[in-house]
Amino acid sequence: MKHQPDFRRYLVSFDASSLGQVFTDTLIIGAGIAGVRAALEAAQQVRVLLLCKGTLDESNTWHAQGGIAAVFDPDDSLQAHIKDTLLAGGGLSDEKVVDLVIRSGPALVQELVRWGAAFDRHKGRLALAREGGHSASRIVHAHGDATGQAITNCLINRLKDQPAIRLMENTFVVDLLSDQDRCVGALIAQPGKELTIIWAKRVILAAGGIGQMYRETTNPPGATGDGYALAYRAGARLEDMEMIQFHPTTLYVAGASRTLISEAVRGEGATLLDHSGYRFMPDYHPDAELAPRDIVSRAILQQMAKTGRANVFLDVRHMGPKKFRTRFPHICAMCESFDITPGKDLIPVRPSAHYMIGGVTVDINGQTSLQNLYACGEVAATSLHGANRLGSNSLLEGLVFGKIAGEHAAQAAQRQTRRLAPLPLGNSITPSHKTRLDVPDVRNSLRSLMWRNVGMTRDANHLAEAIEIIEFWSRYVMDKVFDEPQGWECQNMLTIARTMAAASLARQESRGVHFRSDFPQSDEKNWRKHITFTVNDPLSQLGK
């Protein structure tokens, strides 16, 4: 597999000596649950600069509905949660990582409670919901279906009390800076300002996911895969880029953006019906609507194909309008804005891109393959989720690895006695004379291409076609120099889309969220391993 066409180390021309300079011990890129938790941990030891692409209420964490998976029920057990996670992971989860994360969960959730997180309670105890793939009720939630907002508000309030943390919102990271195979900082852009250099002893990447790579997604507009592209250009290893989770149930209203209908709704007894009113999930899995997400998503896709319809329905009529509104107030309000009354009417749903399981390879301390660079949250590949993420394990992972990465990065920064100083870094790009493609059109076309060819069902012909088209667009986009985020995002999306398509083509089997119609079975002998990418080794396989 060759390098991406027109690959370049940096996206813009710059001379570090002529730009504004900022110095910090630990730089954190991304302000969702992982980034903020890392900042809070690191700030106990060193100065922290926390960058946010938009505002604090625009992260995937803010939009999370379901909750955090953690063991609090006396009838549940850590071993059961570990077993469920490993089973969902399809043989690619790291047992040590799973054990670490699951065992750390309850204490970190209790920490959020002490910090003021307003989780729902029942008879004085934390209220626990059930989601697909879980053998017990262990989903801690807030305000019914607004867990992400509650956690974000809790963490924001905590940030305000930390003088060692400086927050910069509306800041776009154009590139990570590196020198002799070590990360030394970042090049940033802010509205109405010149580019700025941030020098840091350690950098933590917590930049979120890639949902906007697809035409239909639950992710907010900022989820354009920037963190993966930043790490890749800097030389860090990417892993499991074919493993993209599609959420089974997002509200389907033609012409409207997709909005998540939490898995917790099915946990409360909702069933899936096709257009004839037939409940089809028992035909596909013994756990029916509470089967793992990949199984439910593909079952919906197959039922849509059988009936020739664009959606199926979520039936919550057993709850009635009043009970549904009480348990899921935000989902209810969103449905009612389209004249759908949950509890009385059927809710039209279909799958959408939701979560990137793969990402920047990290070890158990959050350290990437690039010296001085850490990663946590959705952008990181910790091997917790394996080939399929268990619902509500993502916020849990963000808490655990945010704390771990923050602690280890801060300790490493403290040990570095050498004073931070500007380095003579720079980059010069020769102007391109090729035709310039329309960036918004490329983005929209790429999202449609990824949905068609690198979606829930894949095959060699469509994947090869996707790579060919992405490479064509890249020849006319990757050689250009942009001066605003929309152009940089497009370049990041093209870079990462190609790794996703190439990894999907390479994995000649079906496993977890990755389904190949031309290789419908799992191949334990040849493919129980990870596929990785680096700049110098664009496609390799690890037997980890």
Image: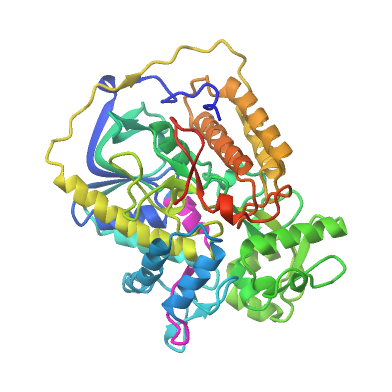
Q: Is residue 454 above or below residue 288?
A: above
Percent x, y for residue 361?
A: 41, 46
Question: What colour scheme has been applied to the protein in the rendered image?
Answer: rainbow
Q: How many marks?
A: 0
What's the residue at 55%, 77% (across, down)?
135
- Left or right: residue 301 versus residue 404 is right
Percent x, y for residue 291?
A: 64, 70
Q: Is residue 219 visible?
A: no
- Left or right: residue 3 versus residue 201 is right
Q: Is residue 103 above or below residue 497?
A: below
Give the farthest residue toward the front: 525
Q: Is residue 71 above or below residue 373?
A: below
Q: Residue 521 or 375: which is nearer the viewer? A: 521
Q: Residue 131 or 268: which is nearer the viewer? A: 131
Question: In the rendered structure, does residue 58 fall within the stretch colored magenta?
Answer: yes
Give the farthest residue toward the left: 417
Q: Is residue 226 above or below residue 344?
A: above
Q: Quadrant of residue 104?
A: bottom left
Give the farthest residue toward the bottom: 123
Q: Residue 468 or 355: which is nearer the viewer? A: 468
Q: Is residue 337 visible?
A: yes
Which corner quadrant holds the N terminus? Answer: top right
Question: In the rendered structure, does residue 529 fall within the stretch colored magenta?
Answer: no
Range covered by the magenta-colored residues: 56-76
- Left or right: residue 193 versus residue 8 is left
What's the residue at 53%, 41% (across, down)?
224
Q: Quadrant of residue 439?
A: top right
Percent x, y for residue 285?
A: 71, 71
